Image (cartoon, rainbow, N blue to C red):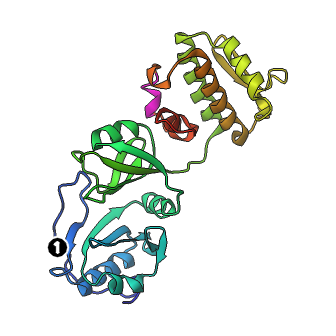
Amino acid sequence: MTDPNPTAAQTGAPPRTPPSALGPVYHQLSTDFYPWTEVIADLRMRAQAGQSLLFQAESPAACARFVWRDGQLLGGYSGARDLPFSALMRGLPRARVTLLSLSGEAAQAIWDARQAEGGQALQGDAATVSQQLAGQSGVLLGHGPERSLSYWQAGKPLHGVWYPEAGEQEWRFMVQAQPLDRTELVQFWSQVLALTHRRAALDEVWRQASLELAADHPALDPFTREIVVRTGELSVDPGVDTDELRPALLAAYRNVLERLGLRIQDLPLENLRQHEIWSASGLAEMMNGGRA
């Protein structure tokens, strides 16, 4: 088998779609009926046209995925193992194949997610998991019979195969790393703290948490006044950079909630869960029981 990036070839991909909300190009077609020669010819044509794609081939024993971004093959993988395209047909002479059209950003996120350290473990049916992913961006893998893979942005599935009616199963979610804008991060946390302050006064508890955590997060030291909460309002010294600010605020907030005996799930943060920074701030993983 040759690399599918070179010359194009004429083919007619079958116009078949699964019962999926995201409409793949084709789904779970058997190579007994859609032969490998036609599969490869179609992939070559799409690569030459500069498309971003996810191709999946699976059998009961194995599942291999290949990703293109803007027509360039990023590579393939099966489980944790990288896989050359030339090995595909030898390893899966008979398979069911699925092709998904992606954005360039989604293709890169899916490719990067292959090396994620397990990701975030979730359990439940599709409706439950969808609620847990509110506001988050990343790649979701389902370990049910569908072997679904979807790319999410701001809590909504945009690309891939996603079954809203899928039943109880284990899922893995790889959060997409996003560069954080410092000003937006401060504004976001200002809203979080103001809403929390309405439920319970924060000032003294924040000072206590800051004293406890100052050794690990010097910016929290109340005597330097780099990060201050007064009457529930956050102020941050301009010299505190984003890499220091994000973990410091998250650690302090977790400590404050523990001291107050509050759960983040019980606070009026529903609107902020739709914010693009919700996931990057660490609060999404905190809400789902992780240590962010």
Q: Residue 119 at what x, y percent from top left?
A: 49, 52
| Residue 16, x across and y down, in percent | 16, 66
In the image, what residue type sits under mark 1? Pro
Q: Residue at x 43, y 42 (%)?
A: 154
Query: On the rendered structure, is 75 left or right of 92?
Result: right
134 above or below 43?
Answer: above
User: Residue beneath label 1, please?
Assistant: 14
Question: Between 76 and 14, which is closer to the camera in this rendering?
Answer: 76
Magenta residues span 269-274
Q: Residue at x 80, y 22 (%)?
A: 225
The answer to which image quadrant residue 86 occupies is: bottom left
Instruction: Categorize mark 1 by other alpha carbons within 10 Å: few (<14), some (14-19), many (20+).
Output: few
Q: Secondary structure at mark 1?
A: loop
Q: Is residue 201 above or below residue 134?
A: above
| x 55%, y 41%: residue | 280
Residue 163 rendering spot, x and y as whole percentages: 24, 50
Q: In the orientation shown, which residue stands out farthest toward the right?
A: 223
